[in-house]
Image: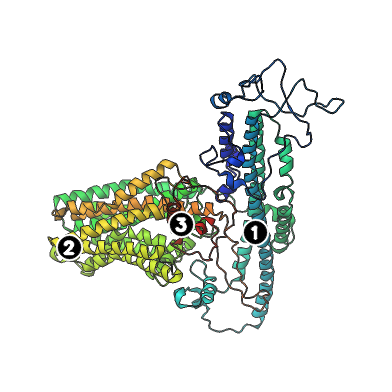
């Protein structure tokens, strides 16, 4: 789908499947030009050159008919010079021979079939030296091409109508919200005049409290409560904030209208270019007549989008710019001024550049002292700092994920339901892990390589304190992002008590790869809870993994959180698949970590070792299959919608299962207890890298599903909701859900699976597996499932 590089940049990623499939059109023309055997369109069968775009899909009610050769000039005929004979034709019949069609192109430089209106003679017939009937080859080629193009135009027309209706609905809703804003302003004036000073507990309503699963509560009550959710807080609407939200919603709405105009213009250009290419290849002249037919369609005749554009400009000017139409147009067009975030990029580079030498020096000093055996405390220091390091490493790798998603135009903000007005840009986010890395490197270098005396024993405590203050203190820098992260952590700790959103299970899976850091919390607090642990090696050893059962429990804790989330999803939906099956997978993970702890505590116990190996194999196999089939929705033939290069998916299908078997290192080095800390570090490092790969494809798979279902935009971020159809000024305006997805119905399957010849049962199972990942979470406002494939299976 490429109309040239310049035009391709204007394609909206989430609407990509709804654009004219220009690449498919070029393939059809190329195969037609090669003279392939062409069945009649009505007799098209699988295996022909248009297998990827089934002919049956184009046979719909609104399909444009194959255009007449020239409806304005019905006497149009082919003509040839009497001195030139058509290549590959029979002299007796003048029709192409089968050999000329299959073995060579009948469209050679000197033997091209040309169509044109022809100048009429006195009797009204074309003034040609010789008239020939339309050849079977050319007629079939024309029918096949224009039947395919008719289906594409029909797809574009239907999608445009749906988007236009949605734009009208959103425009009406925005007008209603702005009218409520004015009533809100008058209501505040009245309250201010009659307000009585006194204490208030309104701040309690800002917290979002845990909820009961839907199976234990009335569905209407749950939906009403969930409609208040916005980034984990709900509250009475502040007028200033509501005004800001509506200004932002007006800008978003205006930009969506511009994108709809761009969609219309790009498809018109694509249709014109593909017909022009056909004309150029076959030396025909269908362009003018075909474009005149498509000009009767709604996407060309309707002026609704233009009217809505003028309405939103007028509405914005009257309510936010004191009636200044010029200022309103400038602000709506300008919107967010592009900010390259040069300072953030520079600061990230400086922090990483300054911290890297210190980090290398600290590692060198720590390993040197460890091998010399100067201080037994060095081993514990390395474990503590390694726990901090893995947290920072996964954040640095997440920065690379964000960059890749931006490069491949994956709408991760839509997937995570982030508010673009307050979310960090992908160039800003690395500042946080870069600052974390520099501080860690600096204090680690002081701890290992600088003679700090007894003060050095408290440096890890200092680093932890700085980390907590930097993350949780309510200072302005990145406050919205940090608040979002804090609420995500709270919901994770209370897993099972909150509905599972995308961020909830995503953060839970991230922590499943950070169990090294989580379990090290027990080591850290145990050591520093004993006071002068650095003077008593025997006492310090009791805090290690070979003695601490708390450390083993914390190693299982992330998997327990995910287990509870799976059960919450089951209780909210009553769908045993995939939630109960997924909970079984995390049960295997819990048992794997549990018996790993037993093996460490009971060294030499053969029974625990055997059970560990059994559950390690079970966990690795189940997790690998789940990653490939569910989270990535991949198989041998991949899947219909791919965002990354094809080779990347095959690499992921090999690398992810391979890294799942990192537990083999524990088995190999069981009898070398002195290597246990190093092996644990290596295994944890492999798991973090594997999670880095998993994040790439899990979010990409979600985006591919959104593309396939044409979930293009979030609903407008509006401040008010209505308890009935006619709200009054006395009603207390409250926050609605901040962002939700809208599923746009589509009458056609966007992409046809390549395994058309597979059995129906296999295809149905394949569809179920590819759709399973969409059930891992719920959106803040439920989305109607419009995928027609599921109903067929």
Point out the residue furthest to the front here.
Answer: 92
Colour style of the rendered protein structure: rainbow
Q: Residue at x 31, y 46 (%)?
A: 357
Q: From the viewer's side, name the closer residue of 141 and 577.
A: 141
Q: Give the quadrant of the N terminus.
A: top right
Residue 270, quarter of picture: top right
**Which mark is on residue 397?**
none
Residue 460 spot, x, y in % from top left: 28, 60
Asked if residue 702 lies left or right of residue 587, the reply is right
Comparing marks 3 and 2, which lies closer to the viewer? Answer: 3
Per the image, the residue denoted by label 1 is 166
Q: Earlier in the sequence, mark 2 or mark 1?
A: 1
Q: Earlier in the sequence, mark 3 or mark 2?
A: 2
Element class at badge 2: helix
Q: From the viewer's side, name the closer residue of 738 and 305.
A: 305
Per the image, the residue denoted by label 3 is 771
Dot 3, how many residues are within 10 Å of its Cα: few (below 14), some (14-19), or many (20+)? some
**Which mark is on residue 608?**
2
The answer to whether the residue labelled 3 contacts the one labelled 2, judged by CB atoms less than 8 Å apart, is no
Dot 2, how many residues are within 10 Å of its Cα: few (below 14), some (14-19), or many (20+)? some
Q: CA distance from mark 3 to mark 2?
A: 38 Å
Q: CA distance from mark 2 to mark 1?
A: 61 Å
The answer to whether the residue labelled 2 contacts the one labelled 1, judged by CB atoms less than 8 Å apart, is no
Q: Earlier in the sequence, mark 1 or mark 3?
A: 1
Q: From the viewer's side, name the closer residue of 140 and 253.
A: 140
Asked if residue 780 lies left or right of residue 464, the reply is right
Residue 279, quarter of picture: top right
């Amino acid at each position: 789908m490429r109309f040239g590089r310049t035009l391709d940049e204007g394609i909206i990623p989430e609407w990509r499947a709804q654009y004219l499939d220009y690449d498919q059109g070029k393939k059809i023309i190329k195969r037609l030009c090669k003279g392939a055997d062409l069945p009649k369109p009505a007799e098209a069968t699988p295996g022909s050159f248009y297998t990827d775009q089934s002919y049956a899909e184009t046979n719909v009610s609104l399909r444009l008919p194959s255009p007449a050769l020239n409806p304005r000039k019905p006497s149009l005929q082919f003509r040839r010079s009497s001195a030139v004979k058509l290549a590959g034709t029979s002299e007796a019949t003048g029709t192409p021979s089968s050999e000329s069609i299959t073995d060579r192109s009948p469209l050679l430089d000197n033997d091209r079939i040309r169509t044109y209106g022809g100048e009429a003679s006195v009797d009204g017939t074309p003034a040609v030296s010789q008239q020939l009937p339309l050849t079977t080859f050319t007629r079939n080629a024309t029918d096949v091409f224009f039947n395919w193009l008719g289906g594409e135009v029909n797809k574009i027309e239907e999608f445009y109508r749906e988007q236009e209706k949605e734009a009208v609905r959103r425009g009406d809703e925005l007008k209603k919200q702005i009218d409520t804003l004015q009533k809100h302003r008058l209501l505040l004036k009245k309250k201010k005049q009659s307000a009585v000073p006194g204490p208030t507990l309104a701040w309690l309503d800002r917290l979002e409290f845990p909820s009961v699963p839907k199976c234990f509560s009335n569905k209407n009550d749950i939906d009403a409560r969930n409609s208040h959710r916005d980034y984990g807080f709900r509250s009475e609407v502040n007028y200033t904030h509501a005004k800001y939200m509506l200004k932002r919603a007006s800008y978003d709405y205006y930009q969506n209208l511009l994108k709809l105009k761009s969609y219309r213009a790009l498809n018109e250009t694509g249709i014109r270019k593909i017909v022009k290419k056909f004309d150029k290849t076959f030396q025909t002249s269908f362009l003018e007549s075909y474009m005149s037919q498509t000009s009767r369609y709604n996407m060309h005749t309707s002026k609704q989008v233009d009217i809505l554009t003028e309405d939103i400009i007028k509405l914005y000017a009257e309510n936010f710019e004191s009636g200044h139409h010029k200022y309103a147009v400038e602000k709506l067009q300008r919107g967010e001024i592009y900010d390259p975030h040069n300072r953030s990029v520079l600061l990230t580079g400086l922090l990483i550049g300054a911290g890297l030498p210190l980090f290398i020096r600290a590692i060198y000093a720590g390993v040197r002292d460890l091998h010399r055996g100067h201080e037994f405390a060095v081993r514990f220091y390395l474990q503590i700092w390694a726990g901090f390091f893995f947290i920072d490493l996964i954040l640095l790798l997440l920065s690379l994920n964000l960059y890749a998603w931006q490069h491949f135009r994956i709408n991760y903000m839509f997937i995570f339901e982030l508010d673009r007005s307050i979310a960090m840009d992908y160039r800003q986010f690395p500042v946080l892990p870069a600052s974390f890395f520099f501080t860690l490197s600096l204090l680690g270098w002081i701890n290992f390589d600088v003679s700090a005396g007894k003060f050095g024993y408290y440096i890890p405590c200092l680093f932890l304190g700085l980390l907590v203050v930097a993350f949780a203190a309510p200072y302005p820098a990145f406050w919205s992002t940090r608040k979002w992260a804090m609420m995500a952590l709270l919901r994770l700790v209370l897993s099972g008590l909150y509905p599972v959103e995308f961020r909830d299970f995503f953060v839970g899976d991230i922590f499943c790869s950070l169990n090294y850091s989580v379990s090290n919390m027990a080591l850290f607090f145990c050591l520093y809870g004993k006071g002068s642990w650095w003077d008593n090696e025997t006492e310090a050893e009791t805090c290690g993994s070979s003695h601490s059962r708390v450390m083993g429990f914390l190693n299982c804790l992330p998997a327990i959180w995910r287990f509870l989330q799976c059960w919450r999803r089951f209780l909210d939906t009553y769908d045993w698949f995939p939630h109960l099956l997924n909970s079984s997978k995390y049960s295997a993970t819990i048992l794997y970590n549990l018996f790993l702890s037993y093996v460490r505590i009971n060294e030499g116990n053969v029974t625990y070792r055997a059970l560990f190996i059994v559950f390690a194999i079970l966990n690795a196999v189940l997790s690998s299959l789940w990653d490939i089939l569910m989270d990535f929705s991949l198989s041998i033939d991949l899947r219909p919608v791919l965002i990354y290069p094809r080779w990347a998916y095959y690499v992921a299908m090999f690398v992810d299962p391979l890294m799942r078997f990192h537990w083999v290192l524990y088995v190999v080095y069981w009898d070398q207890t002195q290597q246990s800390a190093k092996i644990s570090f290596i295994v944890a490092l492999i798991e973090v890298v594997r999670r880095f790969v998993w994040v790439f494809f899990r979010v990409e798979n979600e985006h591919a599903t959104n593309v396939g279902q044409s979930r293009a935009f979030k609903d407008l971020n509006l401040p008010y909701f209505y308890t009935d159809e006619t709200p009054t000024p006395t009603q207390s305006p409250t926050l609605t859900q901040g962002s939700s997805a809208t599923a746009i119905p589509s009458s056609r399957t966007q992409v046809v699976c390549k395994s058309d010849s597979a059995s129906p049962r296999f295809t149905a199972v394949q569809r179920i597996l590819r759709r399973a990942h969409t059930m891992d979470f719920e959106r803040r406002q439920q989305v109607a499932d419009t995928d027609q494939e599921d109903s067929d299976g």
